Amino acid sequence: MKRITSFCCLFFIMLFSMAQQTPALYTVTREMIPMRDGVRLYTVICKPVNNSGPMPILMTRTPYGAGRALPNDSTIDLSNNRYGKEQYILVYQDIRGKNNSEGEFRMHRPVNDPAQKGTIDESTDTYDTIDWLIKNVKGNNGKVGIHGISYPGFLTLTGSVHPHPALKAVSPQAAMGDLFLGDDFHHNGAFRLSYGFEYSYRMETEKDNSQYFPFKQFDLYDWYLRLGSLKNVNEKYFKGKVPTWNNFVKHPNYDTFWQYDSPLRYLKTAAVPTLHIGGYYDQEDITGPQLIYEQMERSDFQKWNHLVLGPWYHGQWEGKADSIGRIAFTVNTADFYKALELRWFNYYLKGIGDGNFDEVYAFQTGSNQWKSYATWPPKETVIKKLYLQPDRSLSFVKPAAANGAVTYISDPAHPVPYRALPIQATYGPKSRWRTWQAEDQRFVYNRPDVACFVMDSLTEDLTVTGKIIAHLVVSTTGTDADWIVKLIDVYPDTDPTDLEMSQYQLPVAMEVFRGRFRKNFSSPVPMVPGKAATIAIDLHMINHTFKKGHRVMVQVQSTWFPVIDRNPQKFIPNIFEAKESDFIKTTQSIRCNSSEPSYIELPVQ
Ligand code: PG9
């Protein structure tokens, strides 16, 4: 038996090393494909040298450099590509206005109504490209798939609107959704300063995105604080030359610009089988996959709309995902996703497999296991209200007293950092941007301007699956304010296996809301000093087990800098035009009493 086992092992080792040694050779052609308006898009087409008959096309469209990582030869080895040995024609394309393509770049170009004859957008460019590919690339089987992460994820989504008949399946991953309500540029109307500034500069200074803003210092918490009012950005640095920044300034509310831009307007249903991928810890596009899945699900009569949620930062699933920051998952969660994606395209583009895909796959953090669900969020949960108590505890029992509040002073001159200092440039050396949402929150929990509520140790596991919503009843002495809520898993007092993890404060859901938008996002209204207002904040969907012995914590604060710009706390119509003197210190009050309860809605299993 022993000999057989070792022979088998040897055999597999040999097979494995042979597989590793066999190169995956591809011929590469580089084409300028004409679009309907005459603009030509640079496209890299990689075809396996050894092929066993017609095969599908798998495409990625990008603003970041098509095939940039590939050697500039006519035959290349794609052994390291996940699809290298899978018999697909792999296609990479620069979108209009970027890198080697012609035309003009427009950030997050919206899809037009097809009735608007003669217009172009990412949907028509995808259609024209597919049409050209199936007619001109020899050896294709007439079926096309698209996948991509982040901006390429958004391009995957837009490419599936009014699809070409040859487009059979897509996988949009970390695709941004509505850029005023969530994701890269704003969250609930609050502006994402550091990302909005650094990303728009990088994307709109050079065609190949090669220019990064030349910060002359390492810690950007200090840099952004010294920047002062946002009107200084154009006055001192951008000089009106960064179109996306100009749009931020021109459109501080959810006006027709953002509404027209929003995929919620034009993505109503899955027009082809669609596998959305999203990360609970996605520092850029946490909302998009959940939001678009939810919207498409309402009319998913074909059962084509599916979702995968994992414990990932932006795009982490493409690499190794056995941990995020200090948090280990015991398995490499990316393996599951990679196998699923291959099964998905093999089924829809090659007819391999049974096509049985569960509605939703959502990794459960805490218990560290993959789960699948027939509906999402699952129907089998009960909404429990976790009340903030005036003594800064948390309980499932509503506060009994008629009065009670927790107050703190919020000072825009000393904003709460969103992660431990120093805060490096997003794309700079030593950047910790990718993992910040899993950072230990002890670096702020005892600041006087962070209200911290905590529960006793759990006597049994508490599993929360679905959407977390914070309901705050709040007031301020100012006329505007931001409200940031974090739901935190506090690890036990002592972890004998890793002392550093004792009392770790792991965020499991967090979000910001700009008070002026509490009635609606289009027409901001001031807060009335001292008058209580109710604010509901969607903290997104999670799947997490707070383990026995852990504690649940909620932190509330009014600044989160510089990921979110400073609210002056005095209502002025356009914060991008605030003067230094508009920024004022205020006292915030969170009501925790029987008639004005503040609570977090937890969908408990
Ligand atoms: N999250 C990036 C993005 C920024 C802005 C708009 C669209 C996408 C990205 O990583 O591509």
Image (cartoon, grey):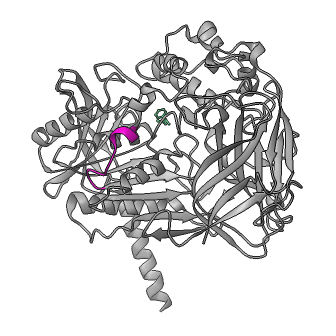
Magenta-colored stretch includes residue 270? yes
492 relative to 102, above or below: below
Of residues 399 and 562, the one nearer the viewer is 399
Of residues 13 and 295, the one drawn nearer to the viewer in this rendering? 295
Q: Which residues are magenta?
A: 263-273
Residue 542 within the segment the image draws in magenta: no
Residue 52 rendering spot, x and y as whole percentages? 16, 58
Residue 443 at least partly seen: no
Q: Is residue 220 left or right of residue 391?
A: left
* Residue at the image point whose x is 76% and y is 32% from the top: 422
Looking at the image, which is closer to me, 299 or 376? 299
For this view, does 572 lie left or right of residue 411?
left
Q: Which percent across, then down, holds residue 534?
A: 68, 44
Q: Is residue 525 left or right of residue 496?
A: left
Instruction: Give the residue drawn at x 79%, y 71%.
Output: 549
In the foreground, 180 or 173 = 180
Q: Position of residue 341 (x, y in %)?
A: 37, 58
Magenta stretch prevailing secondary structure: loop
> Would residue 449 appear left or right of 149 to someone viewing this image?
right
